Each structure stands twice: as C-alpha cells, then as structure tokens.
Amino acid sequence: MKLMTISITLLAAASIAACGTTTASRTGSGAALGAATGAAIGSLSGDAGKGALIGAGAGALGGYVHDRNEKSKERQRW
C-alpha cells in the first residue's frame, strides 16, 4: 500500500512540476510541489517535516534544471 501511495504521489507531482515561464516561478513551483510530495512521503515514515525539507530542495533543483532546459530549447529555435 505504501509503495502505491508513493508512486501515485510522485506521478501526480511530476505531471505538474515546474509550472511557469520564468526561472523564479519554475523553481518556486518545483519547490512547493516537492515539499508537498516530500511531506506526504515523509508522513508515511513518521517524519513529514524532514520529508518536506528534502522534497523542497529536490523540487527547487528540479524546477531550476527544467527551466534551464526550456530556455536552452528556446535559444535553439531562434
């Protein structure tokens, strides 16, 4: 049951991760989604706060990397 909950949470977060058009909005939305996902997963192991902190860091990094990738694609189009 835990594996299914984690899988569904990660899939939902990945499907809407890094929304926005600017670096700040993509990084911020990644951090917010990461924190929510981390808290949900952390609550399964008994430490939602730690999970939220780790998730926020990973989400922010993911949002930033996604932003760099999108900007690179835009530069290649021109």
Image: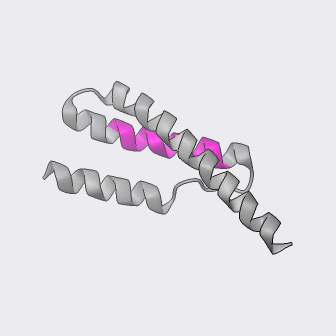
Q: Is residue 38 magenta?
A: yes
Establish if 16 lies above or below 48: below
Residue displayed at 37% across by 38% down = 38
Q: Tell me residue 65's x, y (percent).
A: 61, 49
Q: How many numbered markers are drawn?
A: 0
Q: Quadrant of residue 54?
A: top left
Q: Is residue 3 left or right of residue 58?
A: left
Q: Residue furthest left?
A: 1
Q: Is residue 30 magenta?
A: yes
Please report the bounds of the magenta region as a residue range. Answer: 26-39
Establish if 39 lies above or below 8: above
In which quadrant is the C terminus drawn? bottom right
Q: Is residue 45 left or right of residue 59?
A: left
Q: Is 26 in front, or is 75?
A: 75
Q: Residue furthest bottom?
A: 77
Residue displayed at 51% across by 59% down = 16
Residue displayed at 43% across by 54% down = 13
Q: Quadrant of residue 47?
A: top left
- Figure colour scheme: one colour
